[in-house]
Image (tube, helix red, strand yellow):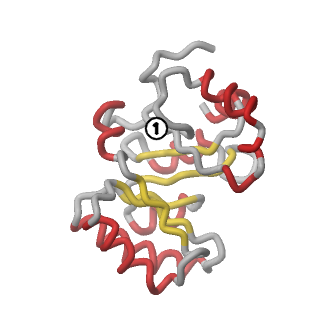
Amino acid sequence: REYAPDFFDLVVVDECHRGSASDESNWREILEYFSGAAQLGMTATPLGGRVLRERLRLYLIADADLVAPELLPAIVEGALRGGVTAVQLRAKRLTTLAQIELARAVRAICARGDVPFIVNDRVDVALATGADGAHVGHAGVEDLPVRDARRLLGPAAILGASVASADEAVRAE
């Protein structure tokens, strides 16, 4: 399918750890598919492409698997002072309760800085904490399908999805 250059608001390349990024031809195919997109993954919100891209210009993935969860709020505060314009919380190994507690703390920091807060993989945690949106992994492969996430989050939420091929991008749409 052909898309206008601004059809997708945001695409985030964060799949390098999966090994698929080592296949240069695969990434070239994805980039061609998203012809006008500035980055790689996708979002659709009423904010509109230009406004959303500006709000997500410097996107921090705050990963509780890389940094002790109790340190993340202070790190996020520092990142916001340094110019971060959006924060995504990734906490795959924490319990649901621990994710909710951490998400509420990080969301409060983001709200004070008027910075969008996004929860990785867990639409339920995003809803419970009043996050601005969620990012699901490879839709229909390992995480909640994009269509279901959108239905749960509503039309105003930021919604991102990981893709590793043009076919996955079509499925995520």
161 sits left or right of 22 in the view: left
4 sits left or right of 132 in the view: right
User: Could you tell me which residue is drawn at 34 percent across and 35 percent down?
Assistant: 46
In the structure shown, which secondary structural element does the residue marked by tag 1 occupy?
Answer: loop
Q: Is residue 97 above or below residue 142?
A: below
Whole-percent x, y for residue 131 in the image: 39, 60
Q: State the count of labels.
A: 1
Whole-percent x, y for residue 90 in the image: 55, 66
Q: Is residue 157 above or below residue 123?
A: above
Whole-percent x, y for residue 89 in the image: 49, 65
Q: Is residue 161 above or below residue 61?
A: above
14 sits left or right of 48 in the view: right
Q: In which image quadrant can residue 166 be found?
A: top right
Q: Quadrant of the N terminus?
A: top right
Q: Residue furthest top?
A: 2
Whole-percent x, y for residue 23 in the image: 77, 38
| Residue carrying label 1 | 10
User: Could you tell me which residue is drawn at 43 percent across and 59 percent down?
Assistant: 60
Mark 1 belongs to which amino acid?
A: Leu
